[in-house]
Image: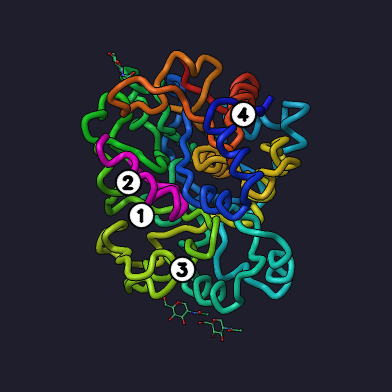
Amino acid sequence: MGLLRGPLFWLLLLLAAACSGILFALYSSAVERSLEPHSGVRDTTSSRAFLQPKSSNSRTRKSHRCQHPLHLAIQRHPHFRSLFDLSKPVLLWWGLFTPELWDHLSQHKAPYGWQGLSHHAINSTLSLLNGSDSAELFAASREPPPNCIRCAVVGNGGILNGSRQGANIDAHNYVFRLNGAVIKGFERDVGTKTSFYGFTVNTMKNSLISYQNAGFTSVPQGQDLHYIFIPSNLRDYVMLRSAILGVPIPEGPDKGDRPHTYFGPEASASKFKLLHPDFIGYLTDRFLKSKLINTNFGDLYMPSTGALMLLTALHACDQVSAYGFITSNYRKFSDHYFDRTKKPLIFYANHDLILEATLWRDLHKAGILQLYQR
Ligand SMILES: *[C@@H]1O[C@H](CO)[C@@H](O)[C@H](O)[C@H]1NC(C)=O
Ligand SMILES: *[C@@H]1O[C@H](CO)[C@@H](O)[C@H](O)[C@H]1NC(C)=O
Ligand SMILES: *[C@@H]1O[C@H](CO)[C@@H](O)[C@H](O)[C@H]1NC(C)=O
């Protein structure tokens, strides 16, 4: 499991032998993909009886109105019960930034921590995330939250081409998308609603370059849309700070970029969420501890953007459907749903998509998520 094959892998292996510096650059520029199909959403329940606002973190719930809340499926499962900690904070914000957290995260490299990053860089970004909106995934919504939060996470896998799942996807309370999430022209297959767009600055910019011809000419924008930053690098903290302040990027590889060209004119802290580095570490350790970690690729490895978004949804929603994620029959489908011609799925050396496929299959079997398959 988890062995990467194919020419790209071997190419990377060679490069690694030759020069780990080049590899690092490759890591920084590898665009992720995530394939995965999803399953037809069981139309549950979900009365929208509005009562208690839900916290995205504390899932000790109160989801009486959910017919099949995922936290019950977790409790019933002998293995997953010991992996999930639904009380783990998903997002990082000013209120969690203590000296203890600084000491702890300074010992881990990004995306799991802040090793090598300056206190000033972190402090100046986090101090902007100081409202309650920054602590909660769903807090920004004006409407009373639904009593059963149903989420769809849409990966970019070729299985969605011709799937006609658009209406099913849009029927969820919240829709998560990521990286090269092309919508125009694919509405019938992938829907139009976007509540959250997840990315690292690296994967976002690479998607804008690599998938431009497929129609990914801008990042999804909208009034009800929120951005989830995955802090894989200093540049993510710098972009986030500049986006909230509404100023050009002052330093680093993105120097001179204007954040509003990506995220639209509305620059306010409530628009942006930051995934907690410790949450990323917990996810990796418990759910996606790849054998790659013990190879030369150890420092490059991290879960794919799609995996991070899907696991985030599993820790914040009552029901989760995954569309466009990798399935066991991935060879039948093109790499992405928006590919013009069929291309095989690319296995980048910094991810372990086979391990991810196994996890989605097992979570689906356990009734914890619904994986779209065909
Ligand atoms: C962190 O940021 C806050 C708010 O900008 C500021 O008041 C404080 O002095 C900063 N702390 C340090 C140690 O720089
Ligand atoms: C919190 O944010 C507001 C602006 O939204 C700012 O004026 C205030 O100083 C911030 N507080 C801290 C502790 O950083
Ligand atoms: C997308 O699906 C259509 C049929 O629904 C097929 O003709 C086309 O080749 C598919 N595209 C790719 C890239 O596989």
Mark in the foreground, 1 or 2? 2
Q: In terms of image quadrants, where is residue 182? A: top left
Q: Is disc 4 in contact with disc 2, using a CB cutoff of under 8 Å?
A: no
Q: Is residue 138 visible?
A: no
Crowd around label 3: few <14 · some 14–19 · many ≥20 (10 Å): many
**Residue 205: % across, % down:** 37, 51
* Type of colouring: rainbow
Tag 3 secondary structure: helix
Say above or below: 219 vs 267.
above
Q: Nearer the viewer, residue 15 or 187?
A: 15
Looking at the image, tell me whether mark 4 or mark 1 is earlier in sequence order.
4
Looking at the image, tell me whether mark 4 or mark 3 is earlier in sequence order.
4
- Amino acid at the residue labelled 2: Ile
Q: CA distance from mark 1 to mark 3?
A: 29 Å
Residue labelled with disc 4 = 4
Mark in the foreground, 4 or 1? 4
Residue labelled with disc 2 = 209
Q: How many marks?
A: 4
